[in-house]
Amino acid sequence: MKQLILAAMLLGAPAPAWARDAGGSFATVEASACAALLDHQKARGWAYNADTAWVAGYLTAYNALTPETNDILGSTDLSGAMLRLQRYCEAHPADSLAQAMLALTAELYPGRRTR
């Protein structure tokens, strides 16, 4: 009986969906600006640790919600992702960290781990 209930629950589970509106817009929560990330990175204080934690949470959510993606980082790690974000933000200081993350995940996607 438990197996039947479990099977029914799995069949009725909704498929993952992107949380964007028809125009591709979405809200971000507590995303710093790229310029702030660069300042935080130079200071290496609590604010940079908070930025790094935000990025880790973003990447974890990306892994959970993106089909056929087990690990978007692929062969890199969080430190490598932060270095790539630093480079992006140096080139685009007016962008938000959320915009930088969209660029980062697009760059990493081809090398992601699917298992």
Image (cartoon, rainbow, N blue to C red):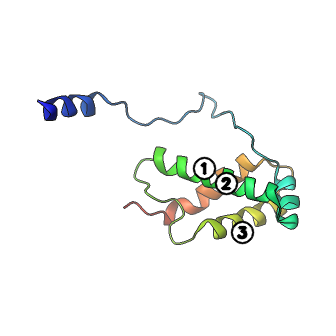
Amino acid type for the residue under numbered disc 1: Gly
CB of mark 1 within 8 Å of CB of mark 2? yes
Horizontal arrangement in the rendering, residue 87 relative to residue 107 (left or right): right
- Find residue 46 and report its horizontal and vertical position in percent: 80, 57
Residue labelled with disc 1: 57
Left or right of 101? Residue 71 is left
State which quarter of the image contains the C terminus. bottom left
Instruction: Check if mark 3's residue and mark 1's residue have beta carbons within 8 Å.
Output: no
> Of discs 3 and 1, which sits in the foreground?
1
Where residue 39 appears, as percent x and y from the top left, is 88, 60
Q: Give the SS element for disc 2.
A: helix
Give 110 or 87, whichever is nearer the viewer.
87
Under circle 1, the secondary element is: helix
In percent of the image, x 54 and y 46: which residue is there? 61
* Mark 2–mark 3 CB contact (< 8 Å): no
Say whether residue 1 is left or right of residue 81: left
Q: Quadrant of the N terminus?
A: top left
Say what amino acid the circle numbered 2 marks: Ala
Q: Which residue is mark 3?
A: 83
On the image, numbered disc 2 is attached to which residue?
A: 53
Give left or right: position of 111 versus 4: right
